[in-house]
Amino acid sequence: MSQSGRPPLEGIRVVDFSRVIAGPMCTQILSDMGAEVIKIENPDGGDDTRKGAGPRAGGESHFFMTYNRGKKSVALDFTKPDGQAVVTKLLETADVLVQNFRPGVLNKYGFDYKSLHAKFPRLIYLSISAYGQSGPLSDRPGYDPVLQAESGMMSVNGEANGEGLRHAIAIVDTMTAIHSVAAINAALFARTSTGKGQHIDLALYDTALSSLGNMGSYYLIGGEQPKRAGNGHFASAPNSSFETKNGKIYMAVANQKLFTDTCKALGHPEWATDPRFAQLADRVANKPELTRMMEEVLKTDTKENWGHKLRHLPAGPIRTMKEALDEPEVKRRGMLKTYKHSKAGEVPIMGSNYRFSDTPVDDTRPPPALGEHTDEVLGSIAGLSANDIAALREKKVIA
């Protein structure tokens, strides 16, 4: 069956005021889905992540390139009246606005939802903030690890006898980005019948709380703090990391059949009927002994070989970043792409994880250099002449 080739959001225009992770990741996914994303950046340095520490390619930040594939960068100072006039022109044909300033920041420039809804009633307006657009905490700044701490997320992560640990990946930002994409697509669908845009208020705090999942319910229903278990699980076994000849493998053997199959795969089918391990509660009670016995077997071979031997089971080697990203399956799945950046040349970046059978995403376009599309967007979308653009540049409204 042939594909139509048209990405699912082709024809949707997004004006993106967001910076750092949650907003930019959201708009990158929208861009992959075919939306035209116009990223408004401060002419003085651009998105905060452009200045970030760590590896750079041709002077361009790895951090910025991670979350800004496929966008059009416009270096524009919207704090100046001439800049506000340009943004208003862009919003005339926009479907979505995404911003993650602190609540109230955009009000003084006339870009709050209430003001824009009166002018552009079909505009979908997404606000990402730390604690929501209203309430006593709304004025607080917030970054991912602080939200992990405050939401209880850290309290369940870490070694059993150690302190609570943050997740190294910006997991609250990442989940907020994904929820943002879902919310925008839902609002676009609702608009097909209502004809109206709407405001979407997404808070990192709310996302962190909703992500507690069954751990949150464990406390709400049982009244007790879930116990930290490091790489293990306080109520399941064998569900942990195990030593092999050359490193560790992770096994998540979550039910009776999987345990029986694991015992067979390790060459000890009798473990499945051993009274110490026969039922889940027995395995949890005798976890140290079960772990010792399993590791005696697992240490006879490498983590890679065990990965192949146990491929029919939920088990796999614990890999370094190099081992994980050099794995042939990463390329086979189309997850690792090489982008030709206008300044940095060829740069490897992760591609999209979305696979549509009829409307494939377009994750082939590189991240932009700062202001790379300023003239193009102001001319073709805002309708400004070359003289108008030159005058704005002279006034330092654009770069």
Image (tube, grey):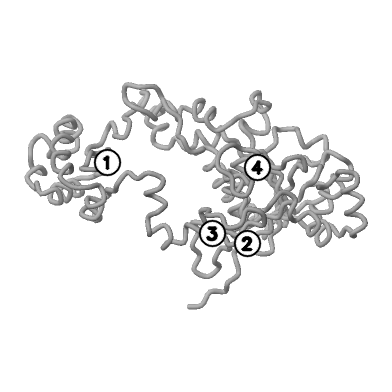
The span from disc 3 to disc 2 (Cα, nearest Å) is 19 Å
Of pointers 4 and 1, the one earlier in the residue sequence: 4
* Residue in the picture at 17% in, 51% down: 261
Q: Which mark is residue 248?
A: 1
Of pointers 2 and 4, the one earlier in the residue sequence: 2
Of pointers 2 and 1, the one earlier in the residue sequence: 2
Q: Helix or strand or loop: what does disc 1 sit on? A: strand
> Do the residues bearing badges 2 and 4 touch, measured as CB atoms within 8 Å?
no
Q: Residues within 10 Å of mark 3 (few under 14, many from 20)?
A: some
Q: Position of residue 9 (x, y in %)?
A: 63, 61
* Residue type marked 4: Arg
The span from disc 4 to disc 3 (Cα, nearest Å) is 19 Å
Q: Which mark is residue 34?
A: 2
Q: Which mark is residue 50?
A: 4
| Quarter of the image where one finds residue 200 | top right
> Do the residues bearing badges 4 and 3 touch, measured as CB atoms within 8 Å?
no
* Residue type marked 3: Thr
Of pointers 3 and 2, the one earlier in the residue sequence: 2
Question: Which callout, 2 or 1, points to the residue nearer the camera?
Answer: 1
The span from disc 3 to disc 1 (Cα, nearest Å) is 31 Å
Q: Position of residue 209 (x, y in %)?
A: 50, 33
Q: Which residue is mark 3?
A: 338
* Residue in the picture at 41% in, 25% down: 164
Taking the image as shown, residue 262 lies to the left or right of residue 331, namely left
Question: Which callout, 3 or 1, points to the residue nearer the camera?
Answer: 3
